[in-house]
Amino acid sequence: MLKVNNIEVAYMRVIQVLHGVSLDVGDGQIVALIGANGGGKTTTLKAISGLLKTEQGEISSGNIVFNDKIISCDEPEDIARLGISQVMEGRRVLAHLSVEENLYVGAYRRNDRPGIKRDLEMVFNYFPKIKDFRRRISGYLSGGEQQMLVIARALMADPQLMLLDEPSLGLAPLVVQEIYEIIKKINLDRKVSMLVVEQNVRAALGISNYGYVMENGKIVLNGPADKLMENEDVKEFYMGLSASGSQKNYRDVKHYRRRKRWLL
């Protein structure tokens, strides 16, 4: 469904952030893009959704193909019409609108009123908590409820592909578990493809079919999600676990640098 082919991205034609990034998302797959903060993961999502243009960024090399159509130069609104929805990092609700009004904003490009009404009930079934607060001003929701709302709002666009940027950010572990269970259920029920950017490696790989590890604007490792979960380097560098299962000792930072052989 989605092919990112060797793209390079620069801001203001000066600051290069991505260096030859390639990845695929298959039809109905969940793919995780993991790595440390500042590695280029969010920039990759913005390159796919077209939002780079709003930040003086551009794809200087390579291309992005969605359902056999090159979308690298398309405007964000045109990419959205093709069926790509992005859930931005930071729970960006329209704080002055009610929960229900936020959801209707997600369906702004649709004109099938029966379908919109049906999908409204669908997202309420997935997220019963926000159904209880459908008349409440969204700015007064908790962090977890706001995260559920922005995922539900993206789903109201009836997308083929959802881009999820750090859905676990700043949330309690039990809330993260609940949200990831719902994301997996949406994928299974609706066959919506998903590209999930996360620093919470265990949560992301736990629901994914395939994963990519990004460091300093490059893909340095990829493979089936279950294999990445068992990779000793992934365990140590991104889960804080050594081969013995103990917590990583930060005094071993020099050893950490030496073992990060994929960056050589």
Image: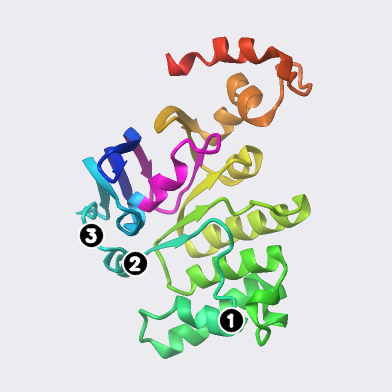
Label 2 neighbour load within 10 Å: few <14, some 14-19, many 20+: some
Q: Between 90 and 78, which is closer to the camera in this rendering?
A: 90
Q: Is residue 133 visible?
A: yes
Amino acid of disc 3: Asp
Labelled pair 3, 1 in contact (Cβ < 8 Å): no
Q: Residue at x 51, y 83 (%)?
A: 118
Residue 247: x and y in percent read 77, 24
**In the image, 116: left or right of 183?**
left
The residue singled out by tag 3 in the image is 74
Residue appearing at x 52%, y 58% in the figure: 187
Position of 154 compared to 246: left or right?
Answer: left
Work out whether mark 1 precedes mark 2 in sequence or the reverse, and give the earlier one.
2
Q: Which one is earlier in the sequence, the residue at label 3 or at label 2?
A: 3
Q: Earlier in the sequence, mark 3 or mark 1?
A: 3
Q: Residue 235 appears in which quarter of the rendering?
A: top right
Could one spot residue 62 in this view of the protein? no
Vertical position of residue 186 compared to residue 24: above or below: below
Category of crowding for the residue at label 3, using alpha-carbon neighbours closer than 10 angstroms: few (below 14), some (14–19), many (at least 20): some
Callout 1, which amino acid? Answer: His
**Relative to the observer, which residue lies in front, 225 or 98?**
98
Compared with residue 243, is residue 195 higher up or lower down, i.e. above or below? Answer: below
Query: Could you tell whether 127 is left or right of 67 in the image?
Result: right
Q: Residue at x 65, y 38 (%)?
A: 202
For label 1, count other residues whose C-alpha is less than 10 Å away and answer few (under 14), some (14-19) or many (20+): few
Disc 2 residue type (three-letter) = Ala
Quote the CA–CA distance across marks 3 and 1. Answer: 30 Å
| Numbered disc 2: secondary structure | helix
What's drawn in magenta, residue-wise? Answer: 21-46
Residue identified by numbered label 2: 80
Q: Which residue is mark 1?
A: 96
